[in-house]
Amino acid sequence: MFRKRSYIAALIGILLAMTVLFMAFGSRLFTDIEEESVVAEESGGGQIVVGVSQLGSESGWRTANTESVQNAFTQQNGYFLIFNNARQKQENQLKAIRSFISQRVDYIVFSPVVETGWETVLQEAKEAGIPVILMDRSIDVDTPDLYVTCVGSNFVEEGEKAGRWLENELSRRGDANRTVNIVMLLGTQGSSSQIGRTVGFASVSSGHENWNILEQEYAEFTSTKGKEVMRGFLRKHPNIDVVISQNDDMTFGAIEAIREAGRTVGVGGDITILSFDAVHDALEMVADGMINVDIECNPNQGEYLLQVIDMLEAGQTVEKRYYVEEDVFTIDNVTKELLQERNY
Ligand code: GYE
């Protein structure tokens, strides 16, 4: 009798444990299956599946660019977005692109961290019949048919704009023939924004023998690195007149370092600051006269990407290159309205 009772108790115990286990994991199992079928239904239900490999989140510009993409590829707009952040590593981008290929997405969009090393993975995408669209930065490949189009900025032109501004500013001050000591904070080594801006600026500076480039160093487009590199420059060179900083985040760091060294920046200050991007906080500093000029780089590329994909879906041919619109900002044209409407 006693044995029979404990047998029944054990049986009830096992049944209870099974129920608990089923509630915990069985429901999870069903959710997963449900989630998978949601994806299948969504993509099969006329939605365009886009895999986006973003290179990282190093700057204010990058955050705005990510938001622009995420606001474009929404379900309301007819998209299913698979987004991956590569945290500045090319190997992570290669992994993400390969996973998009194996998931058979309809389009691959990616912002290449550097210009080289993409042939193999893009050949794989091509063989899988998946069109690839480059966003923001471009790549250096011998066979341009490895990607359909590139939507982004004209970085060489941005560099030239910086050079032309400095040229005009020095003439305005009557310093066109004086020796001008310049240091440069460069962005991520090998990225097309770093390469293009450097080349564009050099095309102007090479025409001025009195522009003395004291030193240039990579500072990874981040404010921490910008500050560290600028500190080093200040220690080595007591005579810096101009800082060319290839993005606003590095500029923020550089300005901190300059002020900590007891020197002044901007309009009327002893170091002239040229920056790139023109994010909101930098434009505030332009309006306050702390940054002399900011060469705009437009991160709002989501809308352009939608237009390109619409054209491809309609079977139209697209251009190989689309440039976004960009301006140049100084204390003379940063208005209150501009500061209000700039949401990045
Ligand atoms: O200037 C910088 C970002 O490639 C245009 O990357 C982009 C650059 C931008 O980190 O802030």
Image (cartoon, helix red, strand yellow):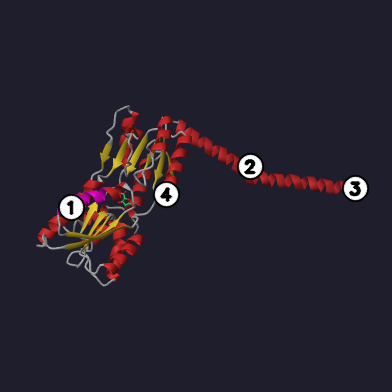
Residue 8 location (% of width, % of height): 82, 46
Nearer-N-terminus badge (1/3): 3
Q: Calculate the distance from the C-alpha at mark 1 to the C-alpha at mark 3.
A: 102 Å
| Residue at the (42%, 48%) spot, across then down | 86
Nearer-N-terminus badge (2/1): 2
Q: Calculate the distance from the C-alpha at mark 4 to the C-alpha at mark 3.
A: 69 Å
Q: Secondary structure at mark 1?
A: loop
Residue type marked 4: Lys
Residue type marked 3: Met
| Residue at the (69%, 44%) spot, across then down | 19
As for residue 332 lying within the magenta part, the answer is: no
| Span colored in magenta | 196-207
Label 3 Cα neighbours within 10 Å, binned few <14 / some 14-19 / many ≥20: few
Label 2 Cα neighbours within 10 Å, binned few <14 / some 14-19 / many ≥20: few
> Can you tell which quarter of the image residue 246 is in?
bottom left
Determine whether label 4 and label 1 are within 8 Å by CB.
no
Residue 306 location (% of width, % of height): 33, 37
Nearer-N-terminus badge (4/3): 3
Residue at the disc numbered 2: 26
Residue at the disc numbered 1: 206
Q: Secondary structure at mark 4?
A: loop
Label 1 Cα neighbours within 10 Å, binned few <14 / some 14-19 / many ≥20: few
**4 or 1: mark nearer the eye:** 1
Residue type marked 2: Gly
Residue type marked 1: Ser
Nearer-N-terminus badge (3/2): 3
Q: Calculate the distance from the C-alpha at mark 2 to the C-alpha at mark 1.
A: 69 Å
Residue 326 in view (yes/no)? no
